[in-house]
Amino acid sequence: MLGIDLNPSLTIGVEEEYLLVDPETRDLAADPPQALFDDCEECLGHHVTTEFLRSQIEIGTPVCKNIAEARRELKRLRAKVSEVAGNYGLRIIAASTHPFANWEVQKHTPKERYDALARDMAGAIRRMLICGMHVHVALEDPDLRIDVMNQVRYFLPHLLALSTSSPFWAGQYMGLMSSRLTVFDGMPRTGVPDRFDSWAEYDRLIARMIEAGVVEDGTKLWWDIRPSARFPTLEMRISDVCTRVEDALTIAALYQSLVRMLVRLRRRNQRWRIYPRTLVQENRWLAQRYGTEGELVDLGRGKRAPFLNLLSEIIEIIREDAEALQCIEAVEHARDIIGRGSSAQRQVAVFNEKKDEGADDKEALIAVVDFLMDETLEGVAEEPGESTVVSLGS
C-alpha cells in the first residue's frame, strides 16, 4: 500500500432512523400517510428518506466539517421531521426497537429496492423492526480506508455499549441492552468484517460476490463497519440510534477521533494491533448483553475490565485528536452517558419504576414510550437559517 494519502479530510456525516408513533395508542403507525413522507422530502430534500418499513423514517446530515456542524444539522433534521409528523398526529422516537410493537403487522414501503429485499430475504427482513445510527468519516484514499477499517474494528463494541437503546422486543424485556443486533444478525453479511490486506482485495471480494449473483453491489454488505459504496467514507454501522441527540454526537465524535488517531499512528509508521475477528465479536456480544454496566475484554492484556476503565483509557489515547477536531467536550460526554445510563438502561429503569408502582406490563411499556417520545426531542430545536455545508452525496 505505497503512496497512500495520509491527509484525509475527516469530514463527517450522520444518519439516524426513527420510528413513527401514534401518541394515543403509543403503538407504531404501521401505515402512515404518504403525504407525511412527501412533506418531509419537500422540506428536507434528499436528507430524509423512507426505510424498509413504513413505520420508519431516516435522516442524513450534509457533510459536516466538525461536530459543531453535525450538532446543528442533527437538531435541525430531528426538529423538522418531528414537526411534519406532528402535522399528521404522529410523533417520532429515536430508539432501536419499539418497546411493544408487533413486527408481524408492519408494512414494508412499496419501492422496487424494498420489494426485492422482501422477496430475497423472506422472513429475515420482515422482522427488521429496528433502527440504527450510521456515522461516515471521509477517508479519500481507498487503501487508507481499508487499513483504518482493519484497526478500528477493535473499538466497535465500545461504541455499541454507549449507544444501546433496544432492551425490549415485542413487549418483552430481553435481558439485553441491544436487542437490535439479535434481529439484525438474522440477515446475511452482518457483524464484524474480515481483515483485508488492501482495497484491491476488498474490491475483488465485491466483484466475486456480484459475479456469483449474491449481491448487486457493496450496499448489500451490512457489516458493522464498511467502506461506503456511495461516498469516499468509512461508515460505522454498529451503534444503536441514540435517544438523546447529545449522546449521538458523542458516538460520532468518538468515532471521528478514533479514525484520526489511527491515521496519526500511520504517519508515524505505527498501527493499532489487529486482533482476530473472533475476539472482537466476543466483545461485541458483551457490549450487546451488558452495555456500559458490564465488562469488556482488554484484548491487549487478555483480561476483562470494567467498561468505565476501558473508556477512560480510550479518551486519553484520542485526547489530542479530539482537541484537534474541536470535539473534546462531546468525547468527554461519554462519561456522562455511563453516569446516568444509556437509553437502554434508562428505559429499563422507567419500566421497573412503573412496575414497582403497581402498573402492569403494558402500562409500564407505555410509560417507556412516553419517556422515549420526550427524550428524543430533549434539547432539540430547529436552527434558524439555511445550512451552508455541502450535501453528503456531492
Image (cartoon, rainbow, N blue to C red):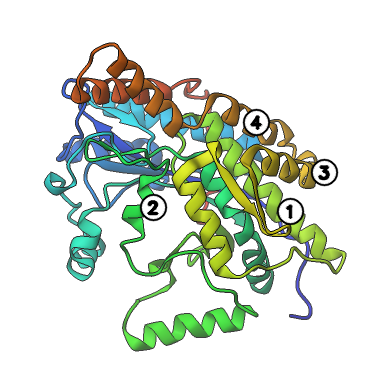
Residue carrying label 4: 335
Q: Secondary structure at mark 4?
A: helix
* Cβ atoms at labels 3 and 1 below 8 Å apart: no
Is residue 256 visible in the rendered image? The answer is yes
Q: Residue at x 23, y 49 (%)?
A: 53
Is residue 236 visible in the rendered image? The answer is no
The disc at residue 260 is 1
Label total for image: 4
Between tags 2 and 1, which lies in front? 2
Residue carrying label 2: 181
- For marks 4 and 1, the one nearer the N-term is 1
Q: Is residue 195 left or right of residue 188?
A: right
Percent position (x, y) of residue 306? 63, 41
Q: Residue at x 22, y 40 (%)?
A: 170
Q: Amino acid at mark 4?
A: Arg
Percent position (x, y) of residue 222? 41, 63
Q: Amino acid at mark 2?
A: Leu
Q: Amino acid at mark 3?
A: Glu
Dot 4 alpha-carbon crowd within 10 angstroms: few under 14, some 14 to 19, many 20 or more = some
Q: Amino acid at mark 1?
A: Arg
* Cβ atoms at labels 4 and 1 below 8 Å apart: no
**Quadrant, the N terminus:** bottom right
Percent position (x, y) of residue 167? 36, 38
**Farthest residue toward the top?**
357
Dot 2 alpha-carbon crowd within 10 angstroms: few under 14, some 14 to 19, many 20 or more = many
Rendering quarter of residue 47: top left
Dot 3 alpha-carbon crowd within 10 angstroms: few under 14, some 14 to 19, many 20 or more = some
**Farthest residue toward the right?**
268
Residue carrying label 3: 320
- For marks 3 and 1, the one nearer the N-term is 1
